[in-house]
Image: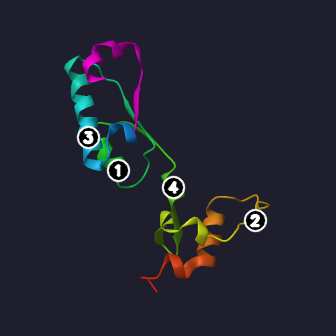
């Protein structure tokens, strides 16, 4: 992309997935900074969109590196119980009990149900 940056003037926004930017947070930040620098070299002030990133750690860091627009489903990776953030990725599928699909209030309610059922699995170090 950097090699052909002068051809981007026809676009309103350029976007990358987190995976395209690199395997680590530092490499992704470096890639964003390189893209931002390359755009400035040809006087293009295009917003950079990072697809798949919307959490409290990476979003401000990507912004500082030069990105402007963020979206993602990171909020699905965590649940909150009594003010404690619990990474849902720490729960394996075999540890989850089935949740009724009849519920119309899916989302956090499902997470809360899972946490209530498997609290001893999710919070062993906090109890």
Residue at image mark 4: 75
The residues tagged by marks 1 and 3 sit, at their Cα atoms, a distance apart of 10 Å
Earlier sequence position, callout 4 versus callout 1: 1
Earlier sequence position, callout 3 versus callout 2: 3
Camera-nearest label, 3 or 2: 2
Circle 4: element type: helix
The residues tagged by marks 3 and 2 sit, at their Cα atoms, a distance apart of 43 Å
Residue at image mark 3: 65
Is the residue marked by circle 2 packed among few (<14), some (14-19), or many (20+) residues within 10 Å? few
Earlier sequence position, callout 2 versus callout 1: 1
Residue 10 lies, with reference to residue 123, above or below; the image says: above
Residue at image mark 1: 58
Is the residue marked by circle 3 packed among few (<14), some (14-19), or many (20+) residues within 10 Å? many
Q: Is residue 33 left or right of residue 69?
A: left
Earlier sequence position, callout 1 versus callout 3: 1
Circle 2: element type: loop
Residue 39 sits in quarter: top left
Circle 3: element type: helix
The residues tagged by marks 4 and 1 sit, at their Cα atoms, a distance apart of 13 Å
The residues tagged by marks 4 and 2 sit, at their Cα atoms, a distance apart of 21 Å
Camera-nearest label, 2 or 1: 2
- Taking the magenta stretch, the answer to whether it contains residue 47 is no
């Amino acid at each position: 992309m950097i090699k052909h940056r002068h051809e981007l003037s026809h676009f309103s926004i350029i976007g990358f997935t987190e995976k395209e930017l690199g395997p680590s947070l530092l490499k992704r930040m470096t890639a964003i900074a390189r893209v931002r620098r390359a755009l400035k070299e040809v006087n293009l002030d295009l917003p950079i969109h990072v697809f798949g990133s919307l959490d409290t750690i990476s979003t401000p860091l990507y912004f500082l590196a030069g990105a402007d627009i963020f979206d993602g489903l990171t909020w699905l990776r965590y649940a909150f119980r009594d003010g404690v953030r619990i990474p849902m990725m720490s729960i394996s599928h075999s540890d989850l009990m089935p949740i009724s699909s009849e519920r119309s209030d899916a989302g956090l309610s499902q997470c809360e149900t899972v946490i209530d059922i498997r609290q001893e699995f999710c919070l062993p170090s906090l109890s």
